[in-house]
Amino acid sequence: MKSKAHDDAMAELYRDDPAFALEVINAILEDGDPAELLIVLRQMAQVLGGIQAVAEQAHLNPTQLYRTLSPKGNPALSSLSAILKAMGLRLAVQPLAASAHAT
């Protein structure tokens, strides 16, 4: 498990370079572990005022949001969409590269 200091350092990095945060999220969505995505979203929540602030914006219970953004969290699509919207983000669907679909 990552340390609190690591989470704080990553949050600071994401605060200083929001484009990098988006690159990390998109890389995880392409081929990463879903637990990694939840950790990054938790770190980004720190940038946006903490879990409490994001929970208020997303109209979610803060305790549930802590659980949802834990490495073992499994958010419903509606919760994930609400969390991303509170962070000023959204999910998008894109076609796979043609070479990945070739038979």
Image: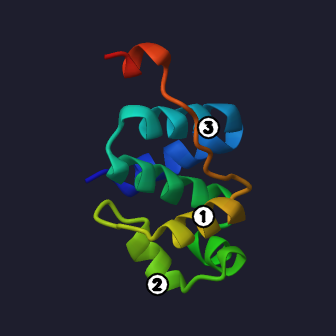
Judged from the image, the secondary structure of the residue bearing numbered disc 1 is helix
- CA neighbours of label 1 inside 10 A, class few (<14), some (14 to 19), many (20+): some
Q: Which residue is located at x 37 percent, y 33 percent? A: 31
Residue type at numbered disc 2: Thr
Figure quadrant of residue 82: bottom right
24 to 61, vertically: above or below: above
Cβ–Cβ below 8 Å for labels 2 and 3?
A: no
**Which mark identifies residue 63?**
2
**Which mark identifies residue 81?**
1
Quadrant placement of the C terminus: top left
* Disc on the earlier residue, 3 or 1: 3
Does residue 33 appear left or right of residue 49 in this picture?
left
Residue type at numbered disc 3: Leu
Q: Which residue is located at x 50 percent, y 66 percent? A: 77
The percent position of residue 16, horizontal first and vertical second, equals 69, 37
Does residue 47 appear left or right of residue 25 in this picture?
right
Would residue 17 be visible to someone looking at this image?
Answer: no
Give the residue at mark 3: 22
Cβ–Cβ below 8 Å for labels 2 and 1?
A: no
The percent position of residue 83, horizontal first and vertical second, equals 60, 66
* Disc on the earlier residue, 2 or 3: 3
Gap between marks 2 and 1 measured at Cα: 18 Å
- CA neighbours of label 2 inside 10 A, class few (<14), some (14 to 19), many (20+): few
Judged from the image, the secondary structure of the residue bearing numbered disc 3 is helix
* Disc on the earlier residue, 2 or 1: 2
40 to 17, vertically: above or below: below
Residue type at numbered disc 1: Ser
Judged from the image, the secondary structure of the residue bearing numbered disc 2 is helix
**Which mark identifies residue 26?**
none
- Viewer-nearest of labels 2 and 1? 1
